[in-house]
Amino acid sequence: MQERTFTYNTDREPLIIPEYGRYIHEMVKYLKTIEDREQRNKNARAIVNLLGRQNTHLRDVPDFQHKLWDHLFIMADFDLDVDSPFPKPSPEKLKARPEKLPYPKKGYQFRYYGHIIKRMIDEAVKWEEGELKDLLIQTIANHMKKNYLTWNKDTVSDEVIFEHLRILSNGKIDLKADEYELRDASQLVKKRKNNGHHKKNYRKKRN
């Protein structure tokens, strides 16, 4: 009786882009052996079309075709001589590390509000007085209250938020609790279904 031997994936050559599967990699490997350039280009386009069919959800992504051709060259280990409609990628560019993002080192009070809130406050200070600036400050104040409740898990008065806003703006934004009212804590920390009506972030109190 003839013995059967099995080849396991662990014994095979590792796949460069596993998402495409071994058959695609075998097709790319065969593509490199085609000597006729016209035939090689024809088969390269066929493989790229096949890659696109496996990623139909990405058809609307900008530069989708460019990405597919890049994947073809990557699976060929950059050793493929075909006419690509896009610049060919290089292994140096692929292996290059992305630039480090600047990390804010300068601290400030009430860090639980987040750096974005601080940047929004700094920007609001620069705006000219008017309705747009008031709306921006409304949004900032309510986000501050929401962040406070998220991190401190406790109730907070509008007076506290207004005081923190005044401090973070270096005294340039000074809201008074007897004139303005922020949204209720239950509205900020709990998600509610959108009924199509939008409420103001805060309203001016009536005398």
Image (spheres, grey):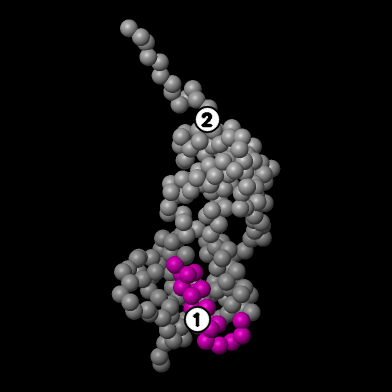
Mark 2, residue position: 14
- Which mark is in front, 1 or 2? 2
Give me the residue at 40% from left, 90% from top: 206
Which percent across, then down, holds residue 98? Answer: 65, 49
The image quadrant where one finds the C terminus is bottom left
Q: Residue furthest top?
A: 1
Q: Residue furthest bottom?
A: 207
Give me the residue at 49% from left, 78% from top: 138
Q: Which sits in the foreground, 10 or 43?
A: 43
Name the disc covering residue 10, or none: none
Disc 1 element: helix
Up/down of 7 relative to 57, above or below: above
- Amino acid on which the number 2 mark rests in the picture: Pro
Tell me, yes or no, whether the highlighted magenta stretch contains residue 145.
yes
Pick whichever of labels 1 and 2 is earlier in the sequence.
2
Mark 1, residue position: 135
**What span is in magenta?**
127-146
Up/down of 162 relative to 58, above or below: below
Which percent across, then down, holds residue 188? Answer: 39, 69
User: What's the CA distance linking mark 1 and mark 2?
Assistant: 56 Å
Disc 2 element: loop
